[in-house]
Image: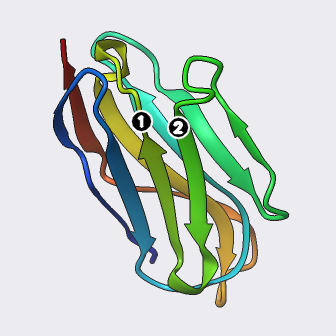
Amino acid sequence: QVQLVESGGGLVQAGGSLRLSCAASRRFFSINTMGWYRQAPGKQRELVAAIISGGSTNYADSVKGRFTISRDVAKNTVYLQMNSLKPEDTAVYYCKIRGRVYDGIYDNDYWGQGTQVTVSS
């Protein structure tokens, strides 16, 4: 099994910054995508940012220019740098890795447990 451990969430004032980290407990044979999602109360989970195996990235329109996703393949870790935070960014943030472990056959989706980000006005 693979566990994804997230860290870096917390309470911040509007305009502030936070950096989320997500580390996998074991190495992957191959990784398709690494991404961050968020879910606010009463809303569906939505994609915030993703980085594909070749290194290309995509972002939700609401975070473009403010958030940056990056990865450290050697450390099996994905990051989300969040700047100019707004109250509407308040949510539980989840990381997800789609990939294949060394003793696996297919790609699977692995999720973190979630980390709370609260932005006060």
Q: Is residue 22 visible in the rendered structure shown here?
A: yes
Residue 34 vertical placement versus 57 (above, below): below
Q: Are marks 1 and 2 in contact (CB under 8 Å)?
A: yes
In the visual, does 92 lie left or right of 110?
Answer: left
In the visual, does 15 lie left or right of 53?
Answer: left
Specify the label residue 67 is tagged with.
2
Residue 31 vertical placement versus 39 (above, below): below
Q: Which residue is drawn at 36% across and 51% down?
A: 19
In the visual, does 23 lie left or right of 11?
Answer: right
Task: Look at the numbered disc 2 and give the secondary structure of its residue.
Answer: strand
- Residue 77 pos. (x, y %): 49, 71
- 107 or 77: nearer the viewer: 77
Q: Residue at x 65, y 46 (%)?
A: 50
The residue singled out by tag 1 in the image is: 83
Q: Which residue is drawn at 47% across and 26% down?
A: 45
- Residue 24 pos. (x, y %): 45, 74
In the visual, does 30 lie left or right of 1?
Answer: right
Task: Look at the numbered disc 1 and give the secondary structure of its residue.
Answer: loop
